[in-house]
Amino acid sequence: MAGSNAIRGARVGSGPMGEMDHGVRAERKKVSYWDALGNETVRYFAADVSDEDIPEQIDSPSTGLPAGQDQQNPPELAKNEPYKTHLAYVKERRTPEEAEELLEAALLKLRQRRGTAKLTA
């Protein structure tokens, strides 16, 4: 007679087969988020978490889009600005007149160092 193992396929300490109660579930609240494509994502938070601590928006795990709690008005994807060069940032900070003054001052300093500066009287 072949030996049989009564616990084969069962977890050690799992209790009687078919036991449904594996402990007490903590109180929680369900919050639904919707993205611009209409996908719903559900997040659960502890029941004692205040509404101010629950995020207004999350990133949808399925699409990567921002998802908000208002199903009728989901948040829109923020438009990415193109890469700006250093010169573009400088042009934002300076007016053309200021740029001209700075250029003249730098050129005068360079010419003085080289000894080719024109004297103005």
Image (spheres, helix red, strand yellow):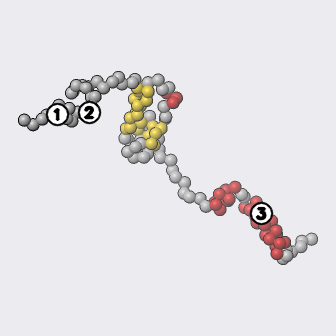
Residue beneath disc 3 = 102
Tell me which corner region of the image, top left, top right, bottom left or bottom right, holds residue 102. Answer: bottom right
Q: Is residue 120 visible?
A: yes
Q: List x then y, in percent, for residue 70.
A: 44, 34
Q: Which of the two residues, 21 or 58, is positioned nearer the viewer here?
A: 21
Q: List x then y, in percent, for residue 17.
A: 21, 27
Q: List x then y, in percent, for residue 86.
A: 64, 60
Q: Which of the two residues, 1 or 25, is positioned nearer the viewer here?
A: 1
Q: State whether residue 77 is above or below residue 57.
A: below
Cα–Cα gap, marks 1 and 2: 13 Å
Residue depth check, mark 3 versus mark 1: number of the one nearer the observer: 1
Residue beneath disc 2 = 11
How crowded pointer 3 is (Cα within 10 Å; few <14, some 14-19, many 20+) is rated as few
Badge 3 amino acid: Leu
Q: List x then y, in percent, for residue 93.
A: 69, 55
| Label number found at residue 13 | none
Badge 2 amino acid: Arg
Residue beneath disc 1 = 5
Q: Secondary structure at mark 1?
A: loop
Residue depth check, mark 1 versus mark 2: number of the one nearer the observer: 1
- Label whose residue precedes the other's in the sequence (3 or 2): 2
Residue depth check, mark 3 versus mark 2: number of the one nearer the observer: 2
Badge 1 amino acid: Asn
